[in-house]
Image: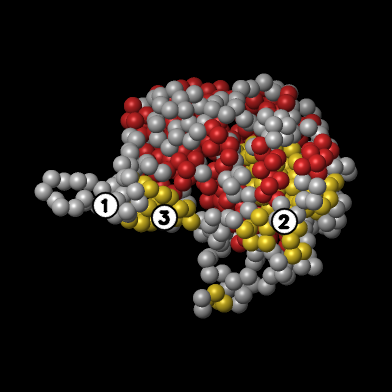
Amino acid sequence: MIPQEISNAIKAKFPDALLEAKVDGVFDPYAKIAPDKIKDVSLFLRDNEETLFDSLMCLSGVDYTGGKLGVVYHLHSMKWNHKFTLKVDVTVENPHCQSVESVWKTANWHEREAFDMYGIVFDGHPDLRRILMPYDWEGYPLRKDYKVPEYYQGMKVPY
Amino acid sequence: MEATLTYTDEKNRGAVTIPGFGRPLRSEEMVLNMGPQHPSTHGVLRLELVVDGEVVVDVIPHIGYLHRCFEKHAEAMINYQQIIPYADRMDYIAAMNNELGYAIACEKLLKIKVPERVEYIRVIMAELQRIGSHLIAIGTYGMDIGAFTPFLYCFRDRERILDIFEQTCGARLLYNYIWIGGLSHDVPASFVEKVKDFCKYYRPNIKELNDLLSYNKIFIERTANVGVLPAEVAINYGVSGPVLRGSGVKWDLRKNDPYSIYDRFDFEIPVGKGLVGTLGDCWDRYMVRVHEMEQSLNIIEQAVDKIPAGDVQSAVPKRIRPDAAELYIRTETPKGELGYYIVADGTTSPARVKVRPPCFVNLSALPAMCRGAMISDVIAILGSIDIVLGEVDR
């Protein structure tokens, strides 16, 4: 399927979940999905015979500055060899988004990483805790307004 | 050896009835820490093993000991070119492949076409590096299992590859060789000769390795039927590279989603066949690497005769400032699918660089492979995934 058809398929199935779609003039065509619908849309895209997105290549957290965070899902179908990108926008005040861990197991560690680095909370994740930083670290390092704490457990952080 | 758990419910897990005892004897689970300082974890990885006797009930990997936030560094750099040395340090035994993926991503953002000579040299370098990385994977895997000699043989052969790299760019491990739009140096005059010599020298050594390790009875006993990963589980976990192919899935980005000039070469994708055990066991994953080295030799031999003349720096941009855009590029490194998600915001440094490290994703499938295995099998399974902690933790 070409990206336009994939986006149309999402629109037909979930009219109120698709917030925006851009398929021309970008490297990776994408569709913006509401944070509380992402799991249903993912499940549909994975199991629908025409899309069959069986692998989640990458899941990234992004800080767009100005209190806006995002999650980007890069999907790929091994059978049809087509790709598509889903995006979810959340805010710093309400960083909640549905987890797609039950759809693709790949998301398990990637969502933990996005939580660790950006503080995005994935509702429904079975084991959402920090993965790369120490468990008692404060703050979310990859946020643009992040300041390195002076001390960690009484030890001076070098820089 | 496959171990089976015979518990019926959570409370009486592993209970045994012994004549003369009034109540069933229960065994209790124990938590055992393997690592972070452990010779078989290939770096600082801590595995929290939940064991019932010798049988592993669950494995919880704890990572992050080598975390230095590559992604934050990438955002703080003044320009795109400066990120390449950091990309080297992710998978530090396959640095060429890391650079290649990043360079391809930036070239696509900048819409540059690199000269043919550069493409050919890059492919040769990437494939030499793939052999070098697999040699470490195989050598250390043998050592994990208890065979020390193959390790020395592998390092002897890898030395020749490092010599070629050293002669080309002066570095043996972290090269900063593949630049955006070109290469840092042209290859020396004796390069073609040296590469051909290596191919001729190394091809018979694969047979030697097979006799010494691959078909060794002790090695097969330790790896066959251990850590079986079925294909559908592998795909759902998103594992890639030899781990995925070991499960019998014919999937290689060099063929299935070609980048650079890989579509011009004739080579096979080796997959696991369950030759000595079950499809998708440790031996299959190991053997895929051995066969891949042969295929890499094929690619190198095809490429080395065709290197065209030209300037390797003619397309290197003076100032790197892509328009606001974002893209995801993936390449096949020795460990699997290495992806770069780069968000450019129109300035001279990227707004976001996310790396999808193959080892990180492959390691996340470790619990699925380890459940029900023995403690000694965990070492065999971990070695067969071939992780580099520099890349897992970034």
Q: Residue at x 87, y 51 (%)?
A: B323
Which quadrant of the figure contains the N terminus of chain B?
Answer: top left
Of circles 3 and 1, which is in front? 1
Task: Look at the picture and state if B116 lies above or below B356.
Answer: above
Asked if residue B3 is positioned above or below residue A127 in the image, the reply reads above
Q: Which residue type does callout 3 highlight?
A: Glu
Of residues A105 and B152, the one nearer the viewer is A105
Residue position for label 2? A35
Residue B82, disc: none
Q: Which element type, helix, strand or loop, lies under badge 2? A: loop
Question: Spatial distance from mark 2 to mark 1, Cα to Cα?
Answer: 45 Å
Which residue is the site of mark 3?
A: B48
Q: Residue B168 at x, y = what percent? A: 66, 39
| Amino acid type at mark 2 | Pro
Mark 2 chain: A
Could you tell me which secondary element the residue under label 1 belongs to? loop
